Amino acid sequence: MKKPMADLHVHTNFSDSTFSPEQVVKTAAEVGLSAIAITDHDCVDGIEPSIKLAAQYSLEIIPGIELTVDNEGYEVHMLGYFVDWQDQAFRTRLKTIQDSRINRIYKMTELLRAQDVDITAEEVFNVAGCGSVGRLHVARALMEKGKVRSMDEAFSRYIGASGPCYVEHLSFTPKEAIELLRSAGGVPVLAHPRVTRNDRFVPEFVTYGLRGIEVYHTDHDRSAEKRYLKMAQKHDLLITGGSDCHGIGKGRILLGTVMVDYALVKALREESDRIKRAG
Ligand code: AMP
Ligand code: ZN
Ligand code: FE
Ligand code: FE
């Protein structure tokens, strides 16, 4: 029998994937996955529809999230697994973050207009649809209007972290993010550390309650995998991995390209149970 495999990092159009929960679930089933974690940016609204749709396939949905965190000027992405997505206090906090993302789009489009790029916040919201809005939506709106030729150009000319139209996220520290996830019973896991270059902060994050590290990721090569495996052993952290699929939002469909053993899902579930019991 085929070994059950999981993809622990998948976005929907409730953040910045071009795929609806229906397309995500269908594609995941087609590529033979047994479980996927829905990890939208600062949003849990894609979880319930995904769970409902997955019932038609033998696909398990792991409730997750990817929080955007500011570590004194360095962007950090913090994944949370088996979060209680129905928890009211958690959802209220997420609403504040989503509102600040909306505000950020007004600021970014104002900066774009100051660069003579004709674009409005409403045009970005139309691209985004539901859930949390972000720079990938700005980039798509710029492409659709013919203001840039590629997503890369949108980031390199305007909205990349050092671009003239970049606006920071709401200030949210790693400690706050880890505590928020744990308060909702979620297992905090550092996302793609090679991409965000936060290796050196791992020991500090562990003191706040970090419990895992994303070892396998589309943008991690073999040497990064080896490095993070070692780091996980050293700090007694759980190992996770996923494709970070954004539909066709990042050029190609990544579902099915990064898979991990289902045993890792069990370890995450047990850790979440421990966090929930410890209250
Ligand atoms: P935001 O949360 O609004 O800051 O947007 C983050 C999204 O933009 C994530 O999906 C990133 O992977 C994506 N992103 C960040 N920088 C770039 C870049 N230079 N090129 C393409 N996508 C990027
Ligand atoms: Zn994204
Ligand atoms: Fe990320
Ligand atoms: Fe992601």
Image (spheres, rainbow, N blue to C red):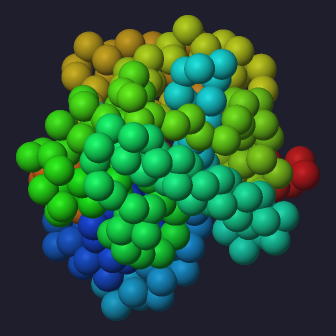
Query: Vertical placement of 273 versus 24: above or below?
Result: above
Q: Quadrant of the N terminus?
A: bottom left
Q: Is residue 234 left or right of residue 262?
A: right
For residue 66, say whether it is visible: no
Q: Measuring from the top left, give residue 197's x and y in whole percent.
A: 44, 17
Single out the residue that lies furthest toward the left. Answer: 149
Q: Measuring from the top left, give residue 114's x and y in whole percent.
A: 39, 40
Residue shown at the point (17%, 55%) measured from the top left: 143
Residue shown at the point (52%, 55%) measured from the top left: 106
Query: Vertical placement of 229 versus 21: above or below?
Result: above
Single out the residue that lies furthest toward the top. Answer: 200
Query: Vertical placement of 272 versus 73: above or below?
Result: below
Residue 98 lies in what quarter of the image? bottom right
Nearer-the-camera pick, 45 or 30: 45
Q: Measuring from the top left, give residue 223's x and y in whole percent.
A: 26, 13
Nearer-the-camera pick, 13 or 136: 136
For residue 99, say whether it is visible: yes
Residue 192 lies in what quarter of the image? top left
Residue shown at the point (53%, 28%) measured from the top left: 75
Residue 157 lies in what quarter of the image? top left
Q: Is residue 212 left or right of residue 209?
A: left
